[in-house]
Structures are given as structure tokens and as C-alpha cells.
Image (cartoon, grey):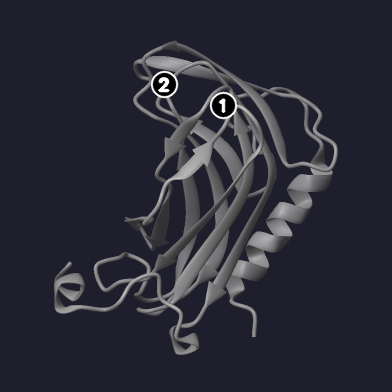
Amino acid sequence: MTHPCIASTAATISALRTANISGRLDADTRLSPSVYFSSDDKGGTADVTLYPHEGGLINAEIKVTGHPGWLSLNIGLGTGAFNEGDTLGIITDIRGTDTFNIRPYIRSSRNSDEQDTILSKDITFGGTPTISTLLHTVSPADALPHDEAYHTLILPLPIRDLSLVLNDLCLFHLGAESGLSEYSMTLGRLAG
């Protein structure tokens, strides 16, 4: 059975692929109901302009003025529960202005409580299209293995002018019972 967050993400990506939004984004504009750019505007601004990207997901030019505290692309994964030992996989086909790495995380929201799970590997943006595969095995220290929550994949972006082309994104889930783990369980890992 497909995990509800995987089904939700697949629907989100499909909607984004057909949306073909272009033009300058206002602060509250969403690319689809659960995909949006976010920035802290206290120390500066990040202006996002989208360009047509037929068959792809996002083609954005970002201009930063001042020093915003953060800049990110947020992708809602939907509501679901994960178990300790589950493995989440993210595959991206992405290009940036130049080469840089980001460490994505998943924000889990339960009622008014938000907690983050920092994923175990960077995603690489290259000056040419770069495919990155990230596997993250859910550990006891993560915010993921608890009650059902709304999860958002957050891609923190460099706080500077940049181009971002997201050709594709795929999320997959393997339950703990599959036996796949990105690492061997040890007492040290269990301790966090």
C-alpha cells in the first residue's frame, strides 16, 4: 500500500508540472496548494520570478536585497505517520546558477507544534542538471516517527541571487519491514 505522504506528494508534483506558472510571485503566491517559496523579510527581501518550464516543475530567478534570515522552497508532503526504521528516499533533477549543496529537512506539524528532521545527506545543485539521490532512515531522534502529522520538505536555499531549475522530484518510502536501512543500527545511533 502506498504511504499517504507519497500519494500526496505525487499529486502535488503532477499538479505543479501542469501549472506552468510564470511571472513575479507575490509573498503569498503558491505555485500549487502546497508548494511555495518562503523568506524572512525582516533583514531583506527575496523576489522570485518564474519562467515557463514545459515538462519540468520550476524555473525560478531569485533576486535578494539586503540580508533575509532565510530563503527556502517548501513542498508539502501531506499528512501521515512514519515509523522508526522506515527509509525515505528523495530523488531530484535540479540545476542552480553554479554548484552548491543544501541540507534539506522535513518539518512535522502536529497541532501547533512544529519539529524538524534534518535529513542525512545534502542535495547538490550544479551549473548543469544534476540528479541527487538522498536516503534517510528514520531514527528515534527524528521528529518523523511519532503520531500522524503534516510534513513539509524544506529546501533551504543560499541567501543570494540565484537561478533554480527543478526538472523533477520523486519521493519514495520503504517501511522498516523491508529491511533496507541507510545505516546499521548501533547503540550509539540509538542514543542520538
43 sits to left or right of 53? left
Q: Amino acid at mark 2?
A: Asp
Judge from the rendering whether residue 187 lies leftward or rightward of residue 78; answer left or right: left
Residue occupying image coordinates x 59% and y 32%: 28
Q: Quadrant of the N terminus?
A: bottom right
Residue 133 vs residue 44, the one in the foreground = 133
Measured in 3D between alpha carbons, the distance from the residue under mark 2 to the one under mark 1, in whole angstroms, is 10 Å
Whether the residues at callouts 2 and 1 have beta carbons within 8 Å, the answer is yes
Identified by mark 1, the residue type is: Ala
Query: Where is mark 2, residue-wise?
Result: 41
Image side of residue 109 versus residue 97, left or right: left
Vertical position of residue 1 compared to residue 152: above or below: below
Looking at the image, which residue is at 19% across and 75% down? Answer: 190
Q: Position of residue 39 (x, y in %)?
A: 45, 28
Q: Position of residue 33 (x, y in %)?
A: 66, 48
**Count of marks, rendered view:** 2
The spot of residue 67 in percent (x, y) is 36, 15
Secondary structure, mark 2, is: loop
Give x and y (percent) for residue 68. Answer: 38, 20
- Label 1 element class: loop
Using the image, determine if residue 55 lies above or below residue 127. Answer: below
Please give the label number shown on residue 145: none
**Image: 179 above or below 87:** below
Q: Is residue 45 left or right of residue 110?
A: right
Residue at the spot 54% in from the left edge and 35% down from the top edge: 125
Which residue is drawn at the image coordinates 47% and 46% (left, top)?
Answer: 154
Residue 110 falls in image quadrant: bottom left
**Disc number at residue 27?**
1
Q: Quadrant of residue 115?
A: bottom left
